[in-house]
Amino acid sequence: MNPMKKLSLLFCLAFIISPLVEAQMEVDNKTNDRTLKVMTYNLRYASGTFKTPWEVRREWQVDLINKYSPDIIGTQEGVKDQIDYLMEQLPEYVVIGEGRRGGDNDEHNAIFFKRDLFRLRGMGSFALSETPEVLGSGPARWPRIVTWARFAFINVPDDGETSQEQMKNKPFWEDSWFQDASGKILYRRHWENTLEFYVFNTHFFTQGKDKGKRNSAKLIMERINDVDNFGEWTKNRPVFLMGDFNSRPGSDVYKIFIGDENSNNQSLLKDSMEGGKGIDWILYKGNVEVLSYENVNYNVNGAYPSDHRPILVEYKILE
């Protein structure tokens, strides 16, 4: 073939193939990215002095959660009976967490998650005190804790294929070291496409107790930084910290988590609402993009199911 014609043919093929490759890469990127709807909600404990009794409010809260359908919910102040009611009425969710004195006793910082979206790979609680492993070791009257969990997205095969079939159909030049000499799929292949993240849920001291709040924030930051990737073969997992912090943006507590305009510490968190808002926050860290933020104004004829409005944030977790 004439060299000039060959060059012209190669140019035409490149012109045709390049957009197709870019389109496929775009599809792959969209496939790998995951969205996540996270809510933090102080339920208001079942107080007899609150204007609307719990027996009425609980139905509103179920309706609210069904309406907005968050994937993860971090709740504060709910006692066992409240948490149990919501769990019974919301069967698509699993709930974890314990009372702030351990077991069923006292208020919970419970975490609800959709059972068909995530696997629970780890969980626990620690006290906001000088002895974190002893629940109830904070202030004798109102101890404070953190409930945490490590989740993994459940991978659902596309087009009805099983995971094993997908692996067999994958071209040999992709991750070929996952096969032995005979082409047999090795177990390690199951590690691919694993996407995990952490959730921390808490409720800080009320007004005053500034020293306790600052020390609590420092302890939480230590725990969050401890769960960074274990080695170079693992990915950094996104982290979400939510709760009722009883502190305002710009406070010392906020700056311990977020820093200020002069901070360049990569271990700091980001606020889902730029500049912050209110005392209920969802902070995050990692390869995450905020898609939307809403201070949910759910009410029934001007009556609210709690003295807090839930915060709902939708994220995109980027691979």
Image (tube, rainbow, N blue to C red):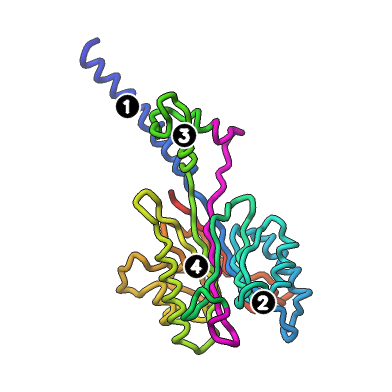
Residue 125 vs residue 232: left or right?
right
**Count of numbered circles on the image:** 4
Read off the residue under disc 4.
Answer: 241
Mark 3 surroundings: few (<14), some (14-19) or many (≥20) residues within 10 A? few
Q: Which quadrant, please, contains the N terminus?
A: top left
User: How far apart are labels 3 and 2 at the CA level?
Assistant: 47 Å
Label ID, residue 186: 3
> In this rendering, is residue 183 above or below 62?
above
Residue 105 vs residue 121: left or right?
right
Q: At x 72% / y 79%, what residue is drawn?
A: 46
Q: Are marks 3 and 2 in contact (CB under 8 Å)?
A: no
Q: Looking at this view, is 250 or 177 the one in front?
A: 177
Residue 145 location (% of width, % of height): 55, 75
Q: Do the residues labelled 1 and 2 touch (CB within 8 Å)?
A: no
Read off the residue under disc 2.
Answer: 105
Residue 121 location (% of width, % of height): 54, 55
Q: Looking at this view, is 278 or 318 the one in front?
A: 318
Read off the residue under disc 1.
Answer: 14
User: How far apart are labels 4 and 2 at the CA level?
Assistant: 23 Å
Circle 2: element type: loop
Type of amino acid under label 3: Leu
Which range is magenta?
Answer: 136-165
Type of amino acid under label 1: Ala
Circle 1: element type: helix
